[in-house]
Image: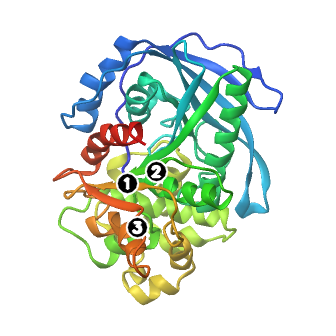
Amino acid sequence: MVVMIASAGSARADEAAPITVPSGVSYELIGRWDVDKLNQILTVDAPKVFDIAVTYTPATNAVRLYRVTYSSIVPEKNNKPIMATGLLAVPETDATSFPVMSYQHGSVYLKTQVPSFPDQSPETQLIIAQFAGQGYVVIGADYFGMGSSTEPEGFGVIASQQQASFDMLKAAQAVLDQMKLSTGKLFIGGWSQGGFATMAFLERLEKVDVKIDGAATASGPADVYSLLSGFLDFPRKNDAPSANLLYILSAFSFENYYGLPGLARSVIADGYYDLARKVYERQPYAFEDIPTDLRKLIRSDYFDPDFFANSAYGKIALATQAYRWIIKTPVHNYYGEADEVVSVGLARLVMTYQQGIGGGNNRVEAISTGPTDHRGTFATAVPLWKKWFDGQ
């Protein structure tokens, strides 16, 4: 759940007027990236942003980028109707049928560093270049509160994250139908927070019998309680200071979506509450003002494992998991052995749990990307996702 602030440059087309399709979904052209632009992302921009040299297969076609606006609901708020946004990237080829890659994004500083604003999202740029640049339709929901959404952010709010991706998938299909394009195999993938969202999305899709041909994550924590407890109870020497933001975003999100006034104040120390609220609401603030010492940011009670487990905050976190069902889809969970955010044990948790069911469910495989950090794990995993998906 790393926070990304760097942004690779991009070529944009003039924004066109939104087009409404019969379902009530609307979409607008926000850019066209040619092959040279896509290959620049793969060879120059991504290695710079993610600080690792990775060999990607070159793009072979240009891509048209659309921002999709669609109706959805907030399950945690009695199915309150809202509008949400996401990205649809369509390969510019003569083909009329494409495999689909649904990408669930990681955590970011700004609400516009998400798929539907690809100019500002380096992770989305890499996915577009590697997948859409080689003939995959790429879709990506902006989680509620992100992109053009006017809702509060729903960081780690599992049912809403499932809903956002599920309704974006339907909205993208409506747009593709309007374009007279069809789809073939469906793949899903995500990094960091997006890895959690991918596993949660997988559970939702399997429950309604939507066939997924493969699911992949990079540095994905499938258990939010384990993630948060790790920094509190068993800190590591390489823990990322930016991980402190997880507590800010989750505390305010849980307060807003589960209707628990004062929850964030009960978690965040008094001296940092106002700053934390600005961080959550994406108001201007100085990043260096966020304490790197978690014991300064979080009230001391939460460092007692029993207190955390029995608190309202801890109980929600404990229920926020995406691995305790019988998984039917082939899954690859990639992890880095030097990841400063998601531990090796947490990244391998889904496989360990599934293999521990009786004789073992072997559909899930945890795969090391070597001594990579959080960003390096994602950058290294993306071409491995692509190679695996191509073979499915």
Which sits earlier in the primary sequence, circle 2 or circle 3?
Answer: 2
Q: Which mark is residue 215?
A: 2
Q: Considering depth in this image, is 58 or 318 the residue closer to the camera?
A: 58
Q: Using the rendered image of the protein, determine whether residue 25 is visible from the camera's viewpoint.
A: yes
Q: Using the rendered image of the protein, determine whether residue 227 is visible from the camera's viewpoint.
A: no
Q: Quadrant of residue 358?
A: bottom left
Is the C terminus in the top left, top right, bottom left or bottom right quadrant? top left
Three-letter code for the amino acid on which mark 1 is drawn: His
Q: Which mark is residue 350?
A: 3
Three-letter code for the amino acid on which mark 3 is drawn: Val
Is the N terminus in the top left, top right, bottom left or bottom right quadrant? bottom left
Label 2 to label 3, Cα distance in Å? 12 Å
Q: Which mark is residue 332?
A: 1
Asked whether, in this view, residue 266 is left or right of residue 166, the answer is left
Which sits earlier in the primary sequence, circle 3 or circle 1?
Answer: 1
Which residue lies at the image location 68% right of the left edge and 48% below the top edge? 151
